[in-house]
Amino acid sequence: MSAAAELASLIRERGPAVVLSGAGMSTESGIPDFRSAGGLWQEVDPYAVASIDAFNRDPLRVWRWYGQRIGVLVAAEPNEGHLALARLEHAGHVRAVATQNIDALHPRAGSEDVIELHGSIRRFECLSCGAHETLDGVLEQLREREAPVCPVCGAVLKPGVVMFGELLPLDAMARAERLCRETGLLLVLGSSLEVWPVAGLPDETLRTGGSLAIVNLGETPYDDAAALVVHERTAAVLAEVAALLASGAGGTPQTEPHRGMTAPWSPPGRTTT
């Protein structure tokens, strides 16, 4: 049985799934990831251009880097994996998507219940007066200046994303934790599961008896605890899974896990940013 057929069978047996997606979900849309060889953090110090301290100290320097990144994100299009997830949600096989990505490709592909754990490029905020600006408004400003400013008070706008040194949005994280506790299957897509606190979400599923499936090119700290691990292209696997489930050819439910969970389960060591 192919890896996609195994995953389709697992979704039939344990779904609807909750999805957790990371940077590897969007690399096939031309968006570089952060930590792999050739990733963004190989070229620049993240604390110099993507931390809240750096923004407060020198927002123009942050925007000289961030302005270029926004151009890449805006030019990207949802790939076949994003589109397949939207089809799976509409068919009732996916309950919600919690994502570490800020590129808004999940909602653009048609996914309706998307929890943006690290924020989104669709929103920008003023730390001085609390006003907000839209992506279109910021893009218009960037045609004429290095950094967009608040239309109300004139202060430099902050990208509406979680920077190093900031907490994740509490409501979004709380909902993701609750969904992971409730689901019978957490499907991790393109995440190294190394950045906390999001990396702890699989624990919520495992502790309540749910299953974990991982599709990622590289290994993760949770591979040994997963019912299924697939080291293949995320987009191709999801497209095949969606086609199998749409045709009713999801395979027979598994009786033995692809990779057994050790007991008792203890979470892997934490890597913080």
Image (cartoon, rainbow, N blue to C red):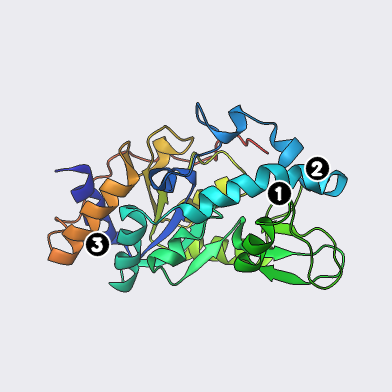
Which numbered disc, 3 or 2, marks the residue closer to the eye? Answer: 2
**Do tag 3 and tag 1 residues touch (Cβ < 8 Å)?**
no
Q: Residue at x 41, y 40 (%)?
A: 225
Q: Amino acid at mark 2?
A: Ala
Above or below, 30 against 250 in this view is above
The numbered mark, 2 or 1, whose residue comes first in the sequence reads: 2
- Asked whether residue 225 is in view, the answer is yes
**Quadrant of the rendering where the C terminus is positioned:** top right
Residue 21 placement, left or right of 185: right
Question: Residue 75, how many percent across, how many down?
Answer: 47, 53
Please tell me whether mark 2 sits on a helix, a strand or a loop. helix
Where is mark 2, residue-wise? Answer: 54
**Do tag 3 and tag 2 residues touch (Cβ < 8 Å)?**
no
Q: Amino acid at mark 3?
A: Arg
Which numbered disc, 3 or 1, marks the residue closer to the eye? Answer: 1
Q: CA distance from mark 2 to mark 1?
A: 10 Å
In front here: 11 or 44? Answer: 44
Where is mark 1, residue-wise? Answer: 163
Residue 73 placement, left or right of 43: left
Which numbered disc, 2 or 1, marks the residue closer to the eye? Answer: 2
Q: CA distance from mark 3 to mark 1?
A: 37 Å
**Do tag 2 and tag 1 residues touch (Cβ < 8 Å)?**
yes
Q: Amino acid at mark 1?
A: Met
Where is mark 3, residue-wise? Answer: 12
In front here: 146 or 62? Answer: 146
Above or below, 66 against 13 in this view is above
The numbered mark, 3 or 1, whose residue comes first in the sequence reads: 3
Question: Residue 101, how many percent across, how many down?
Answer: 53, 52
